[in-house]
Image (tube, rainbow, N blue to C red):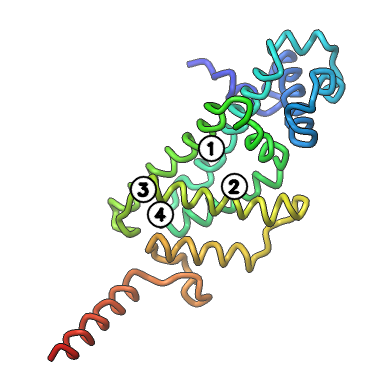
């Protein structure tokens, strides 16, 4: 099966044709200009100047500035989902999956701070493209959460509601500690606090060493606490 246009654009540069490399330069220029100046303030001339191509070259690949934005958001979304899938493949516990997923997302935001802003702009340019960014991320998350619930690794709850809550945590963590700090790495204390919150919220078994750090609480410990509470209540009733 031939590669999709999106996967071709996000492929390594040395695997692309000359035309695909030119298109990639235009998309990278759009990412920077739209992220820095905003979609509405940016012109096609700004994009071609940044990409160092002629104005007419832009129209070889895109019919409009809006089409360029849509393809940019779709391409980067595909790239992000691929990286998340590869980073979490083969991991056994939900704690490991969440840690790897959050770390991968935050590292991706450091590399692509402009697209983070572009996606927010997209809501006012093409609402469906904006929604699809989150829907596609959410669909992958829901599948993984449902599998963890079925395996008894996390508490049972509405997986879609959980997915969007977790995406919001990642989104705002990236905004506060990456974007607002000009691409800084998220401090370890912040990352550990976020993981503590996430794992406790999911009812997940902590990763190795997390209990010692206070970053999680095992299902067994929670069960013992519930049994003690139940026993204390029964004694009071007597």
Q: Which residue is mark 3?
A: 159
Q: In the rendered structure, are the residues bearing label 4 and label 1 in contact, judged by CB atoms less than 8 Å apart?
A: no
Badge 3 density bin: few <14, some 14–19, many ≥20, Cα 10 Å:
many
Q: Earlier in the sequence, mark 4 or mark 2?
A: 4
Q: Residues within 10 Å of mark 4 (few under 14, many from 20)?
A: few
User: Would residue 47 appear left or right of 202 to someone viewing this image?
Assistant: right
Q: Are dots 1 and 3 in contact, CB under 8 Å?
A: no
Label 4 or label 1, whichever comes before in sequence order:
1
Instruction: Please determine whether, in this image, residue 172 is positioned above or below residue 62.
Output: below
What residue did someone put label 1 on? 81
Q: Which residue is mark 4?
A: 92
Circle 4/circle 3 CB separation < 8 Å: no
Of callouts 2 and 1, the N-terminal one: 1
- At mark 3, the secondary structure is helix
For the point 65% across and 49% down, the residue is 107
Check residue 105 in the rendering and tell me which mark sits there, or answer none: 2
CA distance for labels 4 and 1: 19 Å
Residue 156 placed where, x, y %?
30, 56
| Between discs 2 and 3, the one toward the N terminus | 2
Residue name at image x 67 percent, y 24 percent: 69
Rendered image: mark on residue 5: none
């Amino acid at each position: 099966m031939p590669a999709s246009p999106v996967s071709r654009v996000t492929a390594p540069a040395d695997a692309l044709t000359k035309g695909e490399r030119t298109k990639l330069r235009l998309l990278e220029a759009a990412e920077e200009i739209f992220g820095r100046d905003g979609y509405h303030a940016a012109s096609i001339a700004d994009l071609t100047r940044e990409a160092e191509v002629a104005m007419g070259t832009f129209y070889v690949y895109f019919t409009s500035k809006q089409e360029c934005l849509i393809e940019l958001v779709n391409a980067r979304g595909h790239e992000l989902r691929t990286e998340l899938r590869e980073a979490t493949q083969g991991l056994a516990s939900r704690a490991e999956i969440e840690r790897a997923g959050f770390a991968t997302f935050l590292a991706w935001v450091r590399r692509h701070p402009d697209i983070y802003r572009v996606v927010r702009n997209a809501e006012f340019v093409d609402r469906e493209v904006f929604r699809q960014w989150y829907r596609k991320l959410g669909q992958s998350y829901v599948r993984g959460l449902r599998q963890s619930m079925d395996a008894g690794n996390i508490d049972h709850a509405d997986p879609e509601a959980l997915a969007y809550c977790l995406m919001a945590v990642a989104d705002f963590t990236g905004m506060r500690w990456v974007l607002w700090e000009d691409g800084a790495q998220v401090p370890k204390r912040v990352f550990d606090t976020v993981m503590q919150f996430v794992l406790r919220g999911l009812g997940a078994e902590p990763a190795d060493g997390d209990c010692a750090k206070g970053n999680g609480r095992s299902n067994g410990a929670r069960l013992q606490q519930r049994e003690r509470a139940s026993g204390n209540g029964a004694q009071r009733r007597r």
